[in-house]
Image (cartoon, helix red, strand yellow):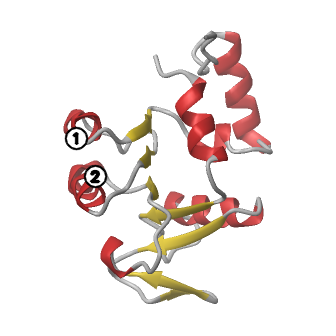
Amino acid sequence: MITLDPILTFLNFEDTFDISGVSRSKSKFGRLVFEQLKSKGYKVKAINPNCNQIEDEKVYKNLDEIPESVKRLIIVTPKHQTAELVSHASRNGFTHIWIQQSSETPESIALCKESNITHVTGHCIFMIAEPVKGIHSFHRSLKRFFGSFPKVTLS
């Protein structure tokens, strides 16, 4: 089970993220993550190889295009793309990766470990990034009740 420590490090390290898998469609999960994090005050840079702009925001084709990347990546892509993204992020010096729940693969997790990348997997960023609202607040409560919500390790 993952502890809350890497999650808090990821969220509190800086307020800027690169997000791979931001969709043009407002109803797709990657787009929802992008818009929710923006509304919570985070600075986010969208990555989607198939578009140049979402509303008034520039969209980057890949990690190489992002100027002055903060080296923190949220991956919200189909599983078959995740390992390649982690590999690319590793080559580009990324230090923190959040692989959205249901996007992780054993290979992508192994790549994070091999590259000494602090990573979060198996959790939905909506349940963690404050303030938690709506259905995600309910899911968070259920996870806490059943003991599957990440815990802070005591040193």
Q: Do the numbered discs 2 and 1 sit on residues whose CB atoms are within 8 Å?
A: yes
Question: Residue 22, percent across and down?
Answer: 48, 68
Question: Residue 54, percent across and down?
Answer: 55, 84
Q: Quadrant of the C terminus?
A: top right
Residue displayed at 44% across by 80% down: 67
Of the numbered discs 2 and 1, the one sitting upstream in the chain is 2
Residue displayed at 69% across by 60% down: 36
Name the amino acid type tagged 2.
Val
Q: Assign a secondary structure to mark 2.
A: helix
User: Which residue carries the number 1 mark?
Assistant: 111
Question: Residue 55, percent across and down?
Answer: 62, 87
Give the left or right position of residue 50, taking residue 39 as reference: left
Residue displayed at 32% across by 54% down: 78
Q: Residues within 10 Å of mark 1 (few under 14, many from 20)?
A: some
Q: Assign a secondary structure to mark 1.
A: helix
Name the amino acid type tagged 1.
Leu
Residue displayed at 76% across by 65% down: 39
User: Which residue carries the number 2 mark?
Assistant: 86
